[in-house]
Amino acid sequence: MELSTLSLHVHALSVLRGLLRHPLVHAYADTLDALDRSPAAFADCYGALCEALFACGGAHRALLDAVHFDANTLTDRLDTPDPSLLDAATHDIAALNGLLALDGAALKAAAAGRFGLPALHALPDFPAAAPLPFRDGASLASFYRAQGYGFFAQSSAFAMQDDGTAAPIVHPDTIRLHDLPGYERQKQQILKNTRAFLDGREANNILLYGDKGTGKSSTVKAVVNEYAGRGLKIIEMSPRHITCFPRLFAETLRSPFRFIVFLDDLSFSREDDNFAALKAFIEGGLAGKPANLVIYATSNRRHLIRETFADREGDEVRVRDSLETVTSLSDRFGLEITFSVPDKDEYLFIVDQLAAENGLTLPADQLHLLAERFALRRNGRSPRTARQFISQQLADRYEK
């Protein structure tokens, strides 16, 4: 494809028009346009293109990700795309592949010939890149159906920011269920509910409550990692971001993925406005929760809000109404799962499993004695204590 024709085709992107705002595509387009301007303008745009290429680490990966993370007219009509829409997508793919086929030598040669300035050959060089893995609009539609699309295709884990937007977590926790020995009944309950959710069946919001260090948060993250390949995403949200729920609901409503909104270490004071807000968002508000979203929360408190004896003996005329307000939020979680402190046998079972996984070979009696001593010096028996004990033993062995 001639460079002037390629330039026109890039400017005529339609289905993938949002890619014109991508820094790399923008730099390609500017460089092609500069061929009709001046040597200085070309050199300036060509340098910016080289910078964009070096920064992205490879044009093929950068443009493939840009197409993948785009939400466009094709993704909006993915179930029954019009033939004309598929033809337009085919045109866009050809234009992007035309950009990927360019190398620095071809651009410099065109500029040197057009401006009669051989010195342009001395500019930096870059190689052509592999084409996108789509033959036409139909294959792009198949890719979107299989891999998903849009902002949430970027990662399996996201975190809510103070401005109310979700941001991808670059290095999410990779913990898996096999890394968490014990609590098999609790894990099976969460897995069963999550599978129902992924299958499009009725699924509950879950409250995991119990003692600290028992693996509540790690279990949620591990379950998400088990099913990330099926399009399950996790969005971590702190209690102070609860008022961002309406915006999050709107952003996830049309996404092809399924989401667990993760509220970790959830608790409220009696005067906290987020308490009433969360109640409405879970159940009871006018705006329904998207079918592709459930809420998993962890807490050390069964009723999530601090309750005092004064609440039971206060001066309200109807004390029962006040107490029901305190307990009403936890009642809106359809599934409540308790993580209790393990007894001695359960704790030592966890220690044995972690020792075996990490190649720690000590006689069982010695291992158990050391583990019990460690728990006494810490905060008592828990999976967290067991993991810390194994880490200490491995560190001591390494130093020896």
Image (cartoon, helix red, strand yellow):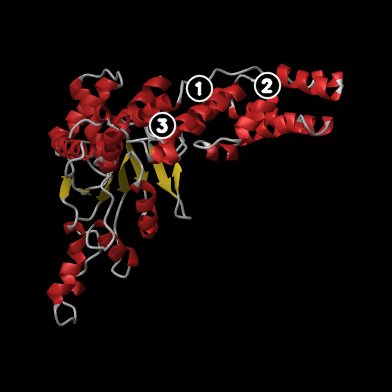
Q: CA distance from mark 1 to mark 2?
A: 19 Å
Toward the viewer: 60 or 182?
A: 60
State the CA–CA distance, disc 3 to disc 2: 27 Å
Mark 1 or 2, which is nearer the eye?
2
- Residue that carries the numbered disc 1 in the rendered image: 132
* x 26%, y 26%: residue: 354
* In this view, 367 is above or below 247: above
Residue ID at (22%, 66%): 307
Which residue is rendered at x = 15% and y = 73% of the image? 321
| In the depicted structure, whether residue 278 falls above or below residue 77 | below
- Name the foreground residue: 165 vs 151: 151
Q: Earlier in the sequence, mark 3 or mark 1?
A: 3
Circle 2 — which element? loop
Determine whether the residue tagged by mark 1 lies in a helix, strand or loop: loop
Mark 2 or mark 1, which is nearer the start of the sequence? 2
Q: Is residue 41 above or below residue 281?
A: above
Give yes or no for contact between labels 3 and 1 (Cβ–Cβ under 8 Å).
no
Task: Give percent across and percent down for residue 10.
Answer: 61, 32
Residue 388 location (% of width, % of height): 32, 34
* Image quarter of residue 99: top right
Amino acid carrying label 3: it is: Pro
Q: What residue type is disc 1 on?
A: Leu
Q: Which residue is mark 2?
A: 2
CB under 8 Å between callouts 1 and 2?
no
Figure quadrant of residue 144: top left
Q: Which amino acid type is shown beneath numbered disc 2?
A: Glu
Residue under pointer 3: 83
Foreground tag (3 vs 2): 3
